[in-house]
Amino acid sequence: MMEREKNDILYLVVPCYNEQEVLPETSKRLKEKMESLMERNMISRDSRIMFVNDGSKDRTWSMIEELHEQDPIFAGVKLSRNRGHQNALLGGLMTAKEYADMTISLDADLQDDIDVIDQMVEKYYDGCEIVYGVRSARTTDTFFKRFTAESFYHMISMMGGEIVFNHADYRLMSKRALEEMAKYKEVNLFLRGIVPMIGFKTDVVTYERHERMAGESKYPLKKMLALAIDGITSLSTKPIRFIVFLGLFIFLCSIGMLIYSLVQHFLGHTSIGWTSLIVSIWAIGGLQLLAIGVIGEYIGKIYLETKARPRYIIEKVLN
Ligand code: UDP
Ligand code: MG
């Protein structure tokens, strides 16, 4: 086991998109947490709280600038425009990696219990490169959110993706783990699917998730669905395999139907009627569209990956 020297530098990385309502409270609570860790000599005095402004349209960035001026414990990264949670997080982590020995990513609304940060840091000193925050109960989420989330995790593992159940993007990553993650160059990034591939010694800490402090969720159903489809298609090609089997199955059925209709024909019975014709046309037509759609998803992914456009552009760093 790798024993680490205490007093390493911790960077909290917090993506923020239109979070002016929660920032005052979030910054206060995170600062208290960092100071208590510093007093107990668990982290270095050079540790920082790094807010990543993901192209917010409200006062978020000017608030981050103010915080940074008042107290150097606050750092900031400004993306050139809105790139979405995953890219903002990646941009923040890749920036923090230059200064930090370990990072912890968390949401600006503090839905994730910040008191488990202590345990995460302890596990880091025990030699863990990655520590996942896992929700023990989802009582504060609506039934709908719980149901969709559960189905999503099951879908991913059915498709052969490796994913930590009930873990969002609240996790500790060491500098070493981040350096390995930086080698995953895919444009279509689904961090939760990539991080388990890195390996090393990992552990989990469990906590209860709170309700959003203020403001609204930035993940409406449409974005959740998009994240699910992106997650599955970026981790696995099983949907294509599934279509192959479905096609094979339907082909076998059609041979059965062929034999059946020939027999009926030679026995002099009337041939297949209107209903069966219409049903087959709709069924086969629908399946074909679905199949093309699935293949299209993958071709679209290939198209985007070949262009290798930057995932985020950093306009400014305050540190
Ligand atoms: N977020 C972001 N860019 C976006 C959307 C969201 O950086 O385009 C941030 C947001 O500020 C928050 C985190 O991602 O810190 C998670 O968003 P939210 O709390 O709205 O999602 P939920 O908890 O409802 O899934
Ligand atoms: Mg939230």
Image (cartoon, rainbow, N blue to C red):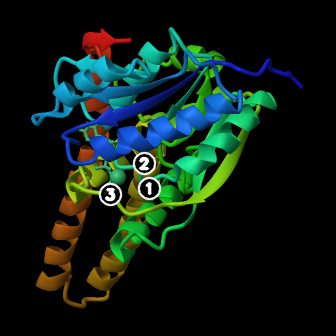
Q: Which of pointers 2 and 1 lies earlier in the amino acid sequence? A: 2
Provide the residue designation for mark 1. Answer: 248
Q: Which of pointers 3 and 1 lies earlier in the amino acid sequence? A: 3
* Of the two numbered discs 3 and 1 in the rendering, the one whose residue sits closer to the viewer: 3
Provide the residue designation for mark 2. Answer: 239
**Residue 237 seen anywhere in this rendered image of the structure:** no
Q: Give SS at disc 2.
A: helix
Measuring 54% from the left and 21% from the top, which residue is drawn there? 47
Q: Amino acid at mark 1?
A: Leu
With respect to residue 197, does 284 lie above or below? below
Instruction: Answer with left or right where residue 222 lies relative to residue 188.
Output: left
* Of the two numbered discs 2 and 1 in the rendering, the one whose residue sits closer to the viewer: 2
Residue 229 image point, x, y percent:
34, 47
Measuring 42% from the left and 14% from the top, which residue is drawn there? 95
With respect to residue 7, does 82 lie above or below? below
Depth check: give the residue in front, 215 or 97: 215
Cβ(mark 2) to ligand 1 < 8 Å? no
Which quadrant, please, contains the C terminus? top left
* Of the two numbered discs 3 and 2 in the rendering, the one whose residue sits closer to the viewer: 3
Instruction: Answer with left or right where residue 118 lies relative to residue 143.
Output: right
Number of numbered tags placed on the structure image: 3
Q: Amino acid at mark 2?
A: Pro
With respect to residue 220, does 42 lie above or below? above
Which quadrant, please, contains the N terminus? top right
Answer few, some or many: residues within 10 Å of disc 1's Cα (few below 14, many 20 plus, some between 14 and 19): few
